[in-house]
Structure formats: structure tokens, C-alpha cells
Image (cartoon, rainbow, N blue to C red):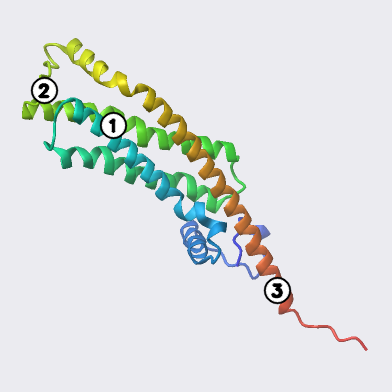
């Protein structure tokens, strides 16, 4: 059965009215059971790919600051959870809720470019900007606590703290700029594929439904 949005007055007599959550669950059931993985690969694996990119970026940024401040094994787990795991999880959840949900429930309700730009915004914000802001704070805190690097007092010498942050951050600025561009482009591509594959899936479902209706129509006998 193909899903479609319609006003109450326009519904046929045999239409089955379901909620958005039920419709979303039904769509995912079709996607996960679809035999040709090439037709739905972006819908299945898109969020996981974006989550992995966010985790990789978080790990790269965290390792940079930890190496510069000679942290070694100090606070490794405590820094990896908020800087690597949390962005990865929230990137996946944001993409599923704010990107895939509108695509699956209302494929023609929003312009594709708007969805792609919004998806890239979530990816770069949660997967790059967030760990870039949090990583130096965590590294400075552990360096002060474990005495691995001399960190100026933030209350007495905020300017020196800023200069130290700028000195440590400057080497990875070109890499971060490249990562932002690459992740934005990859995210927009994957989101475009999700929109396209969902639309093609909807058309295919309508074709299957039409074929089944024709097969079950009573045959006419001519004399």
C-alpha cells in the first residue's frame, strides 16, 4: 500500500487513515525489507555515515588538543564521551528526526535544496563546531588538574589563555576548514540521494499497487 497525504474531504471511501508515527513506522518497514539495497542505501545507511564522520572529526580534534597539552592517558574516556560519542549520537538523531522524517512523510512538501542546506547545517554544527568548542575546554581542564602543561589562570590572565588557545588551534584551522567543506558536500549529497530514493520508492509502490489492482479486477467476457 502506497502512502499519501490528503484532506479529509478528498479521501476515498476505502482509505485507511493513520497517524504520522504509524506512517513513518510503515515506511521504515518497507525500506528495511526492500530487496534491492541499491534503491534505498542512502535511507538505510545515511545517518550512520554522517554519525561516523562526526565521530571521526571529534576524535581528530580531541587528539590534537590532548597531544599538544601532553595529556597521554589522563582523562581519555572522560573527554572522548562528550567530544566524540555525544556529537555522533546527536548527529544521527538530528538527521533522522529533522531530515529523514520530513522526507519520508512529506516528500513533495519542501524544496530539496532547503532540506540539503538544513542537513549540512546540523552536520557541521553538531559534528564539527561543537567538538571544536568543547575539546579545548576539556583539554585545558585536564591539563590543569593533572599538571601536564602550564595553563594560565582564566580569571587572572584570560588574555594569556586566549593566546594559548589560538597558538594550539592555529595549526588545525586549514584542516578544519577542509573538513567543514567536505562534510557539508557529503551531507548534501546523501540528503539529496535520500530524497530522490524515497521519491522513486514511492513511485514504485504506486506501480505495484496499481498492478495488484488490475490483477484483481473482474475480467470482462465478450460474446
Residue 82 in percent (x, y) is at 24, 39
Residue 26 in percent (x, y) is at 50, 64
Determine whether the residue tagged by mark 1 lies in a helix, strand or loop: helix
Residue 8 in percent (x, y) is at 62, 58
1 and 3 marks in contact (CB < 8 Å): no
Q: Nearer the viewer, residue 98 or 49?
A: 49
Q: Earlier in the sequence, mark 1 or mark 3?
A: 1
Q: Is residue 205 rendered to the left or right of residue 105?
A: right
Residue at which label 3 appears = 213
Q: Nearer the viewer, residue 16 or 128?
A: 128
Residue at coordinates 12% horizontally, 30% vertically from top-left? 142
Q: Is residue 64 rendered to the left or right of residue 48?
A: left
Vertically, is 187 above or below 198?
above
Residue at coordinates 48% horizontally, 40% vertically from top-left? 187
Determine whether the residue tagged by mark 2 lies in a helix, strand or loop: loop
Determine whether the residue tagged by mark 3 lies in a helix, strand or loop: helix
User: How far apart are the alpha carbons under marks 2 and 1?
Assistant: 18 Å
Q: What is the crowding at mark 1: few (fewer than 14 residues within 10 Å), some, or many (at least 20)?
A: many
Residue 166 in percent (x, y) is at 26, 16
Image depth: mark 1 or mark 3 in front: 1
Residue at which label 2 appears = 149
Question: In this orientation, does residue 6 appear?
Answer: no
Residue at which label 1 appears = 61
Q: What is the crowding at mark 2: few (fewer than 14 residues within 10 Å), some, or many (at least 20)?
A: some
Question: In this orientation, does residue 112 appear?
Answer: yes
2 and 3 marks in contact (CB < 8 Å): no
Residue at coordinates 37% horizontally, 27% vertically from top-left? 176
Q: Single out the residue that lies furthest toward the right.
A: 223
Amino acid at each position: 500500500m502506497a502512502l499519501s497525504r490528503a484532506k479529509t474531504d478528498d479521501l476515498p471511501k476505502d482509505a485507511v487513515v493513520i497517524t504520522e508515527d504509524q506512517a513513518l513506522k510503515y515506511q521504515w518497514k518497507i525500506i528495511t525489507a526492500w530487496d534491492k539495497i541499491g534503491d534505498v542505501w542512502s535511507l538505510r545507511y545515511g545517518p550512520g555515515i554522517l554519525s561516523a564522520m562526526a565521530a571521526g572529526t571529534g576524535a581528530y580534534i580531541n587528539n590534537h588538543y590532548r597531544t599538544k597539552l601532553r595529556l597521554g592517558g589522563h582523562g581519555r574516556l572522560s573527554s572522548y564521551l562528550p567530544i566524540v560519542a555525544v556529537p555522533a549520537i546527536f548527529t544521527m538523531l538530528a538527521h533522522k528526526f529533522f531530515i529523514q522524517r520530513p522526507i519520508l512523510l512529506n516528500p513533495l512538501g519542501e524544496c530539496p535544496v532547503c532540506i540539503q542546506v538544513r542537513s549540512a547545517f546540523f552536520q557541521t554544527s553538531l559534528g564539527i563546531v561543537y567538538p571544536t568548542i568543547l575539546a579545548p575546554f576539556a583539554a585545558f581542564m585536564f591539563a590543569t588538574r593533572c599538571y601536564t602543561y602550564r595553563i594560565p589562570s582564566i580569571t587572572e590572565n584570560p588574555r594569556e589563555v586566549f593566546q594559548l588557545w589560538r597558538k594550539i588551534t592555529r595549526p588545525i584551522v586549514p584542516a578544519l576548514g577542509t573538513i567543514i567543506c567536505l562534510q557539508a558536500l557529503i551531507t548534501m549529497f546523501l540528503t539529496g540521494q535520500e530524497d530522490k530514493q524515497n521519491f522513486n520508492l514511492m513511485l514504485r509502490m504506486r506501480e505495484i499497487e496499481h498492478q495488484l489492482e488490475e490483477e484483481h479486477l473482474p475480467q470482462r467476457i465478450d460474446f
